[in-house]
Amino acid sequence: MVRASDTKKGVPSLINSMSRLCELCDNKEDDGTLCLSWSRLQAEGTAYDGFVVKRTTFATDEIDAALDALDPLYVYDVIQPMGLGTTLARTKVRRCLIGDCGSTYKYLGLRMFSYPWSYNSSTKMLYALNTKLREEALRLDAKAKADFSVTLVNCMDPSEDELKVSWHADSCLEHSSTIGVYQRIIRNEKARKEEEPWRIRLRVRIDAEGPRRGTPEKEECHIPALSVSLESTSLCYWMLNEFNHHHQHAIQAGSAGRRISSTHRVARREGHTANWILSLGRDTIVKPNWKNVARTLDIIEFEWLRQWFIQGAAHASRLASSWRSTIDELAQFWLALEKLEFSRIRALIDATTSCGDDNNQHTSRRSRKAYARVFSRGGLQAYDNAISDIKTRQTKRSLWAQRESDPNFWHAVASTTVKKKRKKTVVFSEDEKPIINDDASLSSIPGRTFLQARGGSFSDILPYNDLETTLCDLETARSIFESLPSPSPQQQQVSSCTTSSSISTTVLDVGGSTTRSMSGESRKRRRKGRKKKERV
């Protein structure tokens, strides 16, 4: 199997090892790509060691029927391959994600939310296929990491000389994990005598895993690419261990009929499962600090809530039974984190309130304590961090608003739903459109319609909705803070008792339990109140 070290030490041996494949190839394309049938492929000992194709040894009729029955779940995705603020595109392939409960898969700027293995009888059949592919991968290599947690099912229509899936290496997978694929080809009823088969193209690209997003490729060794024909249905192939990390692959369409492939992967769990994000939200709210609150707020909003709502009401309806409670809880976390973030901003501004040049203006006790707290949290660095976080959030919200209002996005979303071909223009219903904000000024509120439907009040959700004004206030406060003297040792001692506490009191009902974080000053007032009652 090719590795990064092979390009430095073993290039001649790798190139020489390709001679056997050259002898087996049917023909060679102009760019040097070797074309051969899957049945003649012998990749062991070559630069493509780790790619294995086999005819299935298990019954496939039920699996094929399950893949056909899942057709209503296959949709085109609207992606942003180069990131936020760039051109939107609709995929050439319809697909859906099935896997462990709460699993997701992110690619090209879009997070896919999975249907659970237990969703219906067809997904249960794919779980049985998942087990068979894992067992076969372990037979091929006993050390293979093949604990497949999701399958991305792709449905591709036939065509000629077209890359249905362009060159890529699969991303968001556990390192050095195996990929197992089962393919079904539904042949045309009026098939031609000479049909072009579907092909998988392979090429060596060191450290290829994940999207490159326009970054220049590393200098590669000159090993010819492979084009392996997949003439037969009921074929399986595996990319074992590090193969995906050091190779790219593409799918070239054929005219033999529609192709459905079930691609089983070991998806990365950290950052990509419901349990992970819910745990992060709970931990941040129970033990808040400024840095973690800002980070978690951005992750929940931009990596989860906006990713959910941008895919439309029809998408939300199909996945409601599996994801509704998770999205509800994330929305509540988002509201609580917004309030905690406002508390942070309020504290930074309070630290400089009544601290002007007027000597007759006395500094309030609240301001002195706020000033001492900010000083203990880094002083000017605390202002710089807050300003940087607000600017980043402002930019992302602006780019998401552009994505939601992009005419190309509306056109692409409308075409994600498959309709029967008619001469008249197809009119799509409201539930096929994305849930987006009807007022651009409220674009900072993800899932506004969703939250309003559950009785959410937005009058005080975003106390600093105008981020431009907030930035001006923070920058002004920073300049004032910079001119102030350091707090006295007594003030620093007071502030050190409250640095681990949150700035304000936040009460949130999370999963039926009440989480309360109280400032040190609030606790002190409460103790004094109890003592007064006792004396009375």
Image: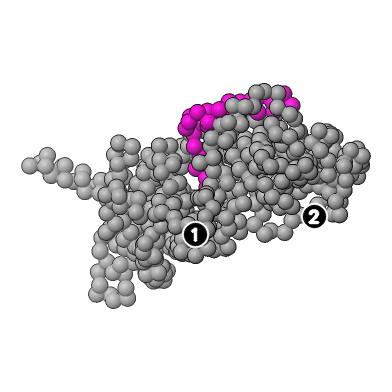
> Magenta part of the protein: which range?
111-140
Give the numbered dot on residue 509.
Answer: none
Q: Is mark 1 on a helix, strand or loop?
A: loop
Q: Between disc 2 and disc 1, whose residue precedes?
A: 2
At a point 61% along the width and 48% down the height, the residue shown is 93
Judged left or right of residue 133, residue 528 is left
Name the image quarter holding the C terminus.
Answer: top left
Q: Where is residue 223 in the image (x, y as percent from the top left)?
A: 85, 48
At a point 79% along the width and 36% down the height, the residue shown is 38
2 or 1: mark nearer the eye: 1
Q: Position of residue 510 (x, y in %)?
A: 33, 40
At a point 39% along the width and 65% down the height, the residue shown is 440
Judged left or right of residue 342, residue 108 is right
Dot 2: within a 10 Å radius of its alpha carbon, few (fewer than 14), some, or many (20 or more) residues? few
Name the kind of residue labelled 2 in the image. Answer: Glu
Q: Where is residue 123 in the image (x, y as percent from the top left)?
A: 53, 31
Q: Position of residue 418 (x, y in %)?
A: 52, 49
Judged left or right of residue 295, residue 266 is right
At a point 27% along the width and 54% down the height, the residue shown is 457
Q: Does the magenta stretch include residue 487?
A: no
Residue, disc 2: 219
Name the image quarter holding the N terminus.
Answer: top right
Considering depth in this image, is 13 or 532 the residue closer to the camera? 13
Residue, disc 1: 424
Considering depth in this image, is 48 or 118 the residue closer to the camera? 118
Dot 1: within a 10 Å radius of its alpha carbon, few (fewer than 14), some, or many (20 or more) residues? few
